[in-house]
Structures are given as C-alpha cells and as structure tokens.
Image: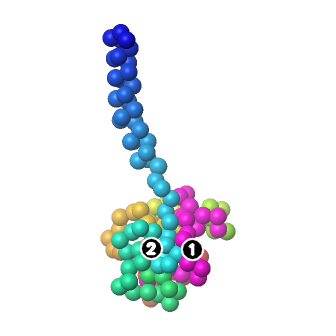
Amino acid sequence: MNRKSISILVLLLLVFVIAIPAIASDTDSPTILCGKCGEVKGSDNCCNADAERHDCGAIKGSPGCCKIAEDGKDLTLCDHCGQVKGSDQCCAEGAEICDHCGKAKGSPGCCLKVEKENDSHNDHDDDDDDDDDHDHDKM
C-alpha cells in the first residue's frame, strides 16, 4: 500500500468511529409500558411493590394508569403521537397536540421524555382535574 491509500483508510476509519455512534444515539428505542404496573418498562419505578396503586391496578400516576389492559401485556407507544401503537387513537387526525412535548395531549407518551417540575404524568397547567394526577376522560 502506498502512503496515499493508508491516509485515505485512516480518514475513513476516523469518520466511521465518529459517525456511527452519533447515528445510533439519534434513534431512540420505542417506549414500552409495563402491562403489570403501567410504568415505562425497565424504569426505576417499574413494578415497584411499595408504589401506591390505583383502582385500575397500575401504579397511580404512571403513564399507563387506566390505560393498561387486564391481560398484563406490555404496551408499545407510538413515537410520533404517544398513543398505544396500532390503537384507534394512534396518529388520529384532529388530536390536540401538547405544547410541551409535541405528542397527543393526554396520551400515555405525553411529556414522558420532557423534564418537568413535578413527578405526576400529564399534569398540564391548563388541566382542570384537581382530584387526581391524570384525566381518565380524555381518552
């Protein structure tokens, strides 16, 4: 190999070393809600035995509270709208969009990846729901 070929190979190697991790970090894995507790699968609070439970069986205030089915199957959320992927509400036309995260307001994925001042899921300033951390009637 001549010197020019080696230089080109080294340059290509550097480009791949820098570019491949950047590409991989841009693609998030889908958000999956645990079918047993309603929390994001694998999160610190997932299936927390000490967490307060809601009447629906999920952890109170979790993204899947009042949205998980009794069969206990995990739910995959749509990356675009935040609704359960493949459901009737998924990417529905006319859905109100959240100003904070850009997903369907009130969806299980609404504001999941947005840092908030408090821990309650979907606690928007303009919600009139004072008796609970989430609104059961929006869905």
Q: Report the residue at 43% width, 45% height from top.
A: 24
Q: Report the residue at 52% width, 86% height from top.
A: 56
| Mark 1, other Cα within 10 Å: few <14 / some 14–19 / many ≥20 | few
Which residue bears the numbered disc 1? 73
Which residue bears the numbered disc 2? 39
* Callout count: 2
Quick check: can you spot residue 84? yes
Q: Where residue 14 sits: x, y (%)?
A: 34, 29
Identify which amino acid the numbered label 2 is placed on.
Glu
Residue stretch in magenta? 60-87
| Mark 2, other Cα within 10 Å: few <14 / some 14–19 / many ≥20 | many
Identify which amino acid the numbered label 1 is placed on.
Lys
Using the rendered view, name the quadrant where residue 7 is placed: top left
Kindly give the residue lying farthest to the top in the view shown: 2
In the image, residue 87 sits, relative to residue 79, either above or below, namely below
Q: Where residue 86 sits: x, y (%)?
A: 64, 64
In front of the other: 65 or 132: 65
Q: Quadrant of the N terminus?
A: top left
Q: CA distance from mark 2 to mark 1?
A: 13 Å
In the image, residue 31 sits, relative to residue 14, either above or below, namely below
Using the rendered view, name the quadrant where residue 96 is placed: bottom right
Q: Secondary structure at mark 1?
A: loop
Q: Which numbered disc, 2 or 1, marks the residue that appears first in the sequence?
A: 2
Q: Where residue 20 sits: x, y (%)?
A: 41, 38
